[in-house]
Amino acid sequence: MNSLYDCCKDRFPEVIACLGNAKRRGRFAHAFLVSSPDPDVRRDFSIVLAQIAGCPAAARTGVPDQDCPYCRKMADLSYEELHTLSPMGKMYQIKVGERINPEPNTLRSFIAAFHLTSTSVYSCKIGMIFEADRMNDEAQNALLKTLEEPPPETTLILSTGNPSSLLPTTISRCQLVPLPGNVCSYAFEGAPEVLAALESLCFGGGGLAAAERTAAALTRVAGGLAAAAKQKTVDAISGQLAAAGKADDPAYLKRLEERIADASSGEYMRERSVFLSAVLTFCQQIFLLSRGVAFTDLPNPELFVSGAPDAGKLSPEFGDFVLKEAEELALTLRFNVSEELAFRTFAVNISMRGHR
């Protein structure tokens, strides 16, 4: 089984080679901005970047050995001097925090951690800010000095799918690591079920029965996103939880549990956004098919789980209607409404319209 480093090297060989060469020559940056449309790619590459930054072997060869305690701990995010920050709460934001005694999971508490005495046998400290575009201007401005002059032996790694949302002053202080991709990746729990239901609704000709099945699938998957988000959060910091249990530190364990609750809420909002994006993007493909665009020329043909559909009977009017209903659904779900009713209205409207 290939290591995380090998997987990233296979996919982005030039980028990995440049980073390794910079580390070996002592020209490794202290702040990076990793950008990719795929959140899993951003996370995995950030880990590999941290391994290159701190592995003793990488300082000599430019390649982390993947087998030293540092690399193993970094792989499961349990390294003692790894500090992470992610959007939290229903607003899915990274808050700046108070200037004095900043709250946990805020930018200022994150920065303060790098000024504490190290507890690791390794000299480096690593900071990762996931979904960095969720920092508002105040938070980004509070980070600028640390980005420009971090504490000794500190590497900061910001990652985002929307680099243009960051302030130019933030971007200018980071080494940019763009990781382009041209495939939509919808990895939320139940994604194949949602896409199959939408496909059946638009091409199956099942009428109201298909509408009920589609609404039920959308409601079921949407209702399970919160539990899936919590499990994903727990899995992401499983190494830290295991370390906390071994350390027999109740206070630290309690802080981790509070962090899980906050992070789960933020992860749920992200997963819900991806879920709605999948529905809207699928309907955009229907619109293009109805305009005569060939399946092979679609921006996102991978969303059709059954392969190329028979699009010959799709009228332009039907394509217009499907896209309009998807946009209306996305707008409706921004408010405190019944998700089940919204999904049922969306599905029934499309089924009643048919291909006419």
Image (cartoon, rainbow, N blue to C red):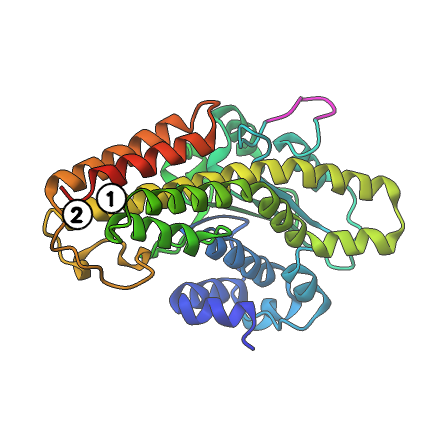
Q: Quadrant of residue 312?
A: bottom left
Q: Quadrant of residue 26?
A: bottom right
Question: What secondary structure is the magenta-colored segment mainly?
Answer: loop
Tell me whether circle 1 and circle 2 mark residues in contact (CB < 8 Å).
Answer: yes
On the image, the x and y values in percent for residue 141 come to 51, 27
Describe the element under mark 1 as helix, strand or loop: helix
User: Label 2 amino acid?
Assistant: Leu
On the image, the x and y values in percent for residue 199 come to 30, 52
Q: Nearer the viewer, residue 343 or 168?
A: 343
Q: Nearer the viewer, residue 48 or 1?
A: 1
> Vertically, is 249 above or below 353?
below
Question: Residue at coordinates 48% horizontally, 50% vertically from top-left?
Answer: 188
Residue wearing tag 2: 288
Give the residues drawn in magenta, as a range. Answer: 96-102
On the image, the x and y values in percent for residue 181 come to 34, 57
On the image, the x and y values in percent for residue 66 come to 62, 71
Left or right placement of residue 160 versus residue 238 in this view: left
> Could one spot residue 168 in this view of the protein?
no
Residue wearing tag 1: 284
Q: Nearer the viewer, residue 177 or 301?
A: 301
Please tell me how crowded label 1 is: few (under 14), some (14-19), or many (20+) other residues with Cα within 10 Å.
many
User: Label 1 amino acid?
Assistant: Gln
> Vertically, is 328 above or below 273?
above
> Vertically, is 33 above or below 12?
above
Question: Residue at coordinates 61% horizontally, 32% vertically from top-left?
Answer: 107
> Could one spot residue 248 in this view of the protein?
yes
Q: Quadrant of residue 163?
A: top left
